Image (cartoon, helix red, strand yellow):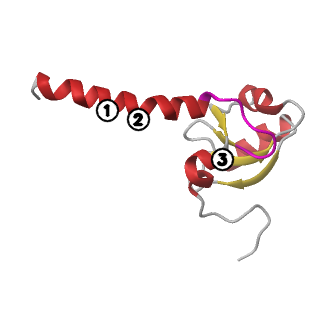
């Protein structure tokens, strides 16, 4: 790749990544949040860890390691202590790639 093409590419990546990083790092609003857990964690493990933090799972995202939660009294800090890599507003990713049914829903 020519170096003349590298700088516009890097500038474009910066323009895209700054708003995304800012959205992921902003304080989480009251109410439901999305939590991204490590790849490979089962939904059972996520259920266990969120229960320890007194959070309530609303549903899972289309990707099995994303959960939409109603945080407990410890809020996002308790979710991070329970293994969540990121805790953010679920609307940032369009409802976390919706497509799954809420917990307890029948077909």
Residue 16 tag number: 2
N-terminal label among 1 and 3: 1
- Please name the residue shown 34% across and 31% down the image: 13
**Residue 8, horizontal then vertical, whole percent:** 23, 29
Q: How far apart are marks 1 and 3 (CA)?
A: 25 Å
- Residues at circles 1 and 3 in contact by the CB criterion of under 8 Å: no
Residue 96: percent from left, percent from top = 60, 51
Which quadrant of the rendered structure holds the N terminus?
top left
Q: Name the residue under label 3.
A: 90
Element marked by disc 2: helix
Name above or below for residue 43 compared with residue 99. above
* Magenta portion: prevailing SS class: loop
**In the displayed structure image, the side of residue 32 where residue 14 appears, left or right:** left
Task: Give the percent coordinates (x, y) of residue 52.
Answer: 84, 35
Q: Which mark is residue 12?
A: 1
**Which residue occupies the foreground of this view, 60 or 19?**
19
Say which of marks 3 and 2 sits in front.
2
Q: Badge 2: few (under 14), some or many (20 or more) residues near its Cα, within 10 Å?
A: few
**Label 2 near label 1: C-beta < 8 Å?**
yes
Q: Is residue 64 magenta?
A: no
């Amino acid at each position: 790749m020519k170096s003349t093409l590298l700088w516009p590419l890097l500038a474009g990546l910066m323009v895209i990544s700054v708003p995304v990083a800012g959205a992921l790092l902003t304080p989480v609003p009251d109410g439901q949040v999305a939590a991204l857990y490590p790849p490979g964690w089962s939904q059972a493990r996520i259920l266990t860890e969120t229960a320890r933090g007194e959070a309530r799972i609303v549903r899972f995202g289309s990707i099995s390691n994303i959960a939409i939660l109603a945080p407990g009294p410890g809020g996002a800090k308790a979710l991070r202590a329970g293994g969540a890599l990121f805790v953010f507003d679920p609307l940032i990713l369009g409802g976390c790639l919706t497509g799954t049914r809420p917990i307890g829903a029948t077909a």
